[in-house]
Every structure is written in C-alpha cells, then in structure tokens.
Amino acid sequence: MACGTRACKKADASGEKGKNKIQGAIVAIVTPFKNGKVDEETLKALIEWQIKSGTHGIVPCGTTGESATLSHEEHMKVVELTVATVKGRVPVIAGTGSNSTEETIMLTRHAKKAGADAALVITPYYNKPTQEGLYQHFIKVADECKFPMVLYNVPGRTSVNMLPQTIARCAANRYIIGIKEATGDLKQVSNVIRLCPKDFTVLSGDDFTALPTMAIGGKGVISVASNVMPKEMSAMADASLSGDMDKAKGLHFKLFPLFESLFIETNPVPAKAALAMMGKISSDEVRLPLALMSEANQGKLKDILGNYRLI
C-alpha cells in the first residue's frame, strides 16, 4: 500500500524528506487497561482530551504505552484506534520498534497501512548491537517500509547508545526524518544537531531536557508529562519554538516538580496513577512485570497533583 502521509508523498515524489509538522509537545500516551484488556473507550477519551488541550501529536505504543507487554493484535488495534480517533487533527507517530528487525518491519508496515504519519523506532534492546548493527537495522527498516521514521535512542532502557555519528549516517536516508533523543546528555544532543541535516527533527525524549533541547535547536519533546498536563506542556513548547524564552522558562520551572514525580517509580506507573487520581482513567492498572505504585509514593504523587490543583 502506498504511503498516504504528506511527508511520505513528498519523499516518494522527490527523493527528499518532506517538511513535516512533527514538533512541539507530543504525548507518549498511556495505554489504559481494564480487567487485563485494553480499555478502548478510555483511550479514545484521553486522545480527545489531549487534542482539546492543544497537544501537538500523539505517540501510541511507545514505552509509556507499555508496548513491551502488548500482543501484536493489541498493538495494531491501539495504533488503528488512535489514527481513527485523531482523524488527521495532529500527527500520529506510532511506536513500531522491536529487538527484531523483521518484527520492526512488520509493525512499521502496519502503521503505514493504518494511516499513521510516521513510526517511532527504538534502538534494538537486549541484543546490544554495534553501531554498524544499529545503522544496518534502521536502514533496512527504512528501505523496506518507505515510511517516515523517527529514531528513538534511550540507553537507559536498551543498554546501547546510538552515537551522533551513527545517527548522522542514518539521517542521510530520505525516510529517516528525526530522532527522539533520551540520553539526557546535552553534549550528545548538541552533536546530533550539529552533525545532522537542518531538516532532521531532534526531539527530547525526557521532559526535563525539553526546554534545553529546544534552546539549542531541537523541535520539541515526546513527553510523559503531557499525559497529565498537556495544555501547559504545549504552551511551553510553543513559547520555546517562538523564541519567548522567558515564558518557556517560567513554565519549565513550574512543571519541574511534575517531571520528577512522574519518575519516582518506573514509567508509566506514576503517570497512570496520576490519571486515575484525576479521574481521567478508571484504573491505574499496569501489566506485569510492572506493579502498582507503592502507597508511600502514591502519597507523594497526590501531594504534587494537589499543588497543581489537578485533584
């Protein structure tokens, strides 16, 4: 099936990366569960709330969406439901990565067929590939799928760091349009921006580095905090990208306690607990091997949410 996105049509037609609107505060949306199954109605409601709140994009089936414990059938359904609910109002960047290149290709082809705007493809985890292995993995996925891809570098989850020089090699491919950089290392982010083409989109993979990343030329953040405070995260990104750094800094420091609180236990456990406390989801259920948040940390999170008047 031919790619239907504006970015991919441009790439197919001219051999160049098309201009895309993947920028700003993009929510790595949680996958709500109810009695062990994906709660589709709640997911649709979350998406509508996100769009109403001004979020700049939706990432289903990312780390925050518990992609690691979704079956292939569930994964595909979540992507399809997200695309159908969004209806083109904001970009949908579907998580499609795996530690298997063939599985990554399969999931990326599905996201393309489902009508997503791009795929978010993580560096293979557990295998611990070399830099050459990483390069060959991403180029094979890009060449096989012919679909806009955002790389995802998160060494804390995968035990492998994709180096700036390797990212720059990948960026020469017309379908590899950007990266979610979650090393938390601004030296690395600076080198990625320095070495890659000007139209290559660099997004922070951590809320706490979103503002610094945008200050040095990044285009936004794929955000956990946007699950909880999408309006404020979008406002911070808008201010940063428009050059209103005083406003952006004010929002950054206002949101910083939330950034910290959402990682007092493994993501997305705190995000789901927060949404449940706010009444946005009916259950804070996560899938094993993740466990519900401890009572002590629930108390800390509740205090933070209370300070923001979210509960």
Image (tube, helix red, strand yellow):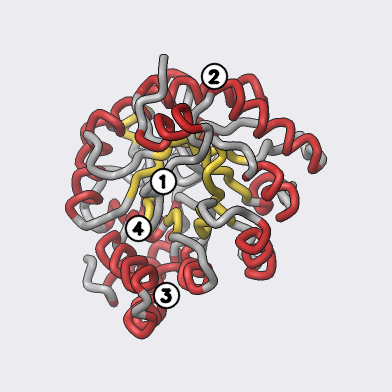
Q: Nearer the viewer, residue 88 or 278?
A: 88
Q: Is residue 75 left or right of residue 217?
A: left
Asked if residue 213 is positioned above or below residue 168 in the image, the reply reads below
Asked if residue 125 is positioned above or below residue 162 in the image, the reply reads above
Residue shown at the point (27%, 57%) measured from the top left: 277
Res 20 seen here: yes
Asked if residue 114 is positioned above or below residue 219 in the image, the reply reads above
Residue shown at the point (51%, 52%) measured from the top left: 199
Q: Please give the residue where the numbered disc 4 appears in the rendered image.
A: 226
- What type is the residue that disc 4 sits on? Ser
First along the sequence among labels 3 and 4: 4
Q: Quadrant of residue 296?
A: bottom left
Mark nearest the camera among 4 and 1 is 1
- What type is the residue that disc 1 sits on? Lys
First along the sequence among labels 4 and 2: 2
Q: Are marks 3 and 2 in contact (CB under 8 Å)?
A: no
Q: Please give the residue where the numbered disc 1 appears in the rendered image.
A: 19
Image position, residue 305 (x, y; %): 30, 69
The image's mark for residue 106 is: 2
Image position, residue 215 (x, y; %): 49, 74
First along the sequence among labels 2 and 1: 1
Mark nearest the camera among 3 and 1 is 1
